[in-house]
Image (cartoon, grey):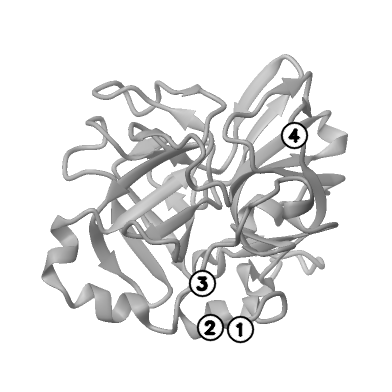
């Protein structure tokens, strides 16, 4: 767990009947609604059963039946009863049930995400940011419910290493971040958020690379200025510029809304080792 990261990994946004309680996750603030664009980015509804509520994250279709997301979305201590994914750009609910058409699936995550348990139990502590990757394997191809949908492209090995050597990356619209979730109006408190139910997008430059993560700036100003990332959208993608190549998956942010976030890279051998069990790699 990196020092200075608020609550470590920021998982999903939990909705319980009559109560809205944030637990780890984040989303894009500012930017704009995508409409029909980025239609391969979906909303992941997660039934947590015993809590009488649900959590949600974002994810990206990378094969006809495979959605990549963050491990902390699907690897919590609470048992998952059911997972459903919709690719509609606006989501609605019937009580706590997702009202949009969608496809159910089975979720799993990179086992390296868990540290050894301190009490000798079978489950470890969820603190390995560098391995914060999971997938939802859909029960049917996404196109059976969402005709015309096409998977995003995965990157070649080391794409971001070569990209980062270009100094212009820190001054460009290097990444397009997409997701559902919370929204904060410009120049308001990082804690002043609302859920718009819409898929949104924003662009931002590179901050720096780590071996298995990439740090992205939502803007060049302080966390309360325009742009940035907020609770409600973990697992969403960062596309390289305006391309359809997803190079990383949202993982951590420092406050409920902040101008900087870290995503787990998909161009590393580590990520490929995990994804190879589910998809064909470039």
In the rendered structure, are the residues bearing label 4 and label 3 in contact, judged by CB atoms less than 8 Å apart?
no
Q: What is the secondary structure assignment of the residue under circle 3?
A: loop
**Image quadrant of residue 102?**
top right
Q: For this rendering, which residue is in front, 267 or 212? A: 267
Residue at the disc numbered 1 = 273
Which residue shows up at 51% across the image and 23% down it? 196
Q: Are marks 3 and 2 in contact (CB under 8 Å)?
A: yes
**At x 38% / y 25%, what residue is drawn?**
184
Residue 81 in percent (x, y) is at 87, 45
How far, Cα to Cα, is label 2 from label 4?
A: 35 Å
First along the sequence among labels 3 and 2: 3
Q: Nearer the viewer, mark 4 or mark 3?
A: 3
Q: Circle 4 sits in a helix, a strand or a loop, which is it?
A: strand
Query: Left or right: where does residue 229 sit relative to residue 47?
Result: left
Q: Could you give the CA–CA distance between mark 3 and mark 2, rounded to whole angstroms? A: 7 Å
Residue 64: x and y in percent read 71, 63
Query: Pointer 2: what residue?
Result: 282
| Mark earlier in primary sequence (4, 1) | 4
Query: Along the polypeptide, which appears first: circle 4 or circle 3?
Result: 4
Assess disc 1: are there few (<14), some (14-19) or many (≥20) residues with their C-alpha within 10 Å of its C-alpha. Answer: few
Q: Which residue is mark 4?
A: 54
Q: Residue 90 placed where, x, y %?
A: 59, 29
């Amino acid at each position: 767990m990196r020092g200075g990261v608020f609550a470590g990994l920021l998982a999903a946004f939990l909705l319980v009947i009559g109560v809205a309680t944030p637990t780890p996750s984040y989303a894009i603030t500012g930017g704009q609604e995508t409409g029909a664009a980025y239609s391969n980015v979906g909303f992941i509804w997660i039934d947590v059963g015993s809590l009488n509520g649900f959590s949600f994250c974002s994810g990206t279709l990378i094969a006809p039946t495979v959605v990549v997301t963050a491990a902390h979305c699907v690897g919590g201590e609470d048992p998952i009863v059911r997972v459903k994914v919709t690719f509609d750009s606006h989501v609605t609910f019937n009580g706590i049930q997702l009202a949009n058409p969608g496809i159910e699936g089975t979720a799993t995550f990179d086992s390296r995400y868990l540290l050894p348990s301190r009490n000798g139990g079978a489950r470890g502590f969820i603190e390995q940011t560098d391995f914060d990757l999971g997938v939802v394997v859909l029960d049917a191809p996404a196109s059976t419910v969402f005709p015309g949908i096409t998977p995003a492209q995965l990157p070649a090995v080391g794409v971001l290493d070569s990209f980062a050597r270009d100094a212009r990356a820190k001054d460009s619209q290097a990444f397009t971040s997409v997701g559902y979730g919370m929204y904060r109006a410009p120049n308001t408190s990082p804690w002043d958020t609302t859920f718009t139910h819409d898929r949104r997008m924003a662009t931002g430059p590179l901050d720096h690379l780590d071996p298995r993560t990439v740090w992205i700036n939502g803007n060049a100003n302080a966390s309360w200025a325009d742009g940035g990332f907020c609770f409600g959208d973990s697992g969403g993608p960062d596309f390289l510029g305006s391309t359809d190549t997803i190079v990383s998956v949202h993982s951590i942010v420092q406050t409920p809304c902040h101008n900087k976030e870290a995503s787990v890279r998909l161009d590393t051998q580590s990520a490929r080792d995990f994804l190879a069990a589910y998809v064909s790699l470039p």
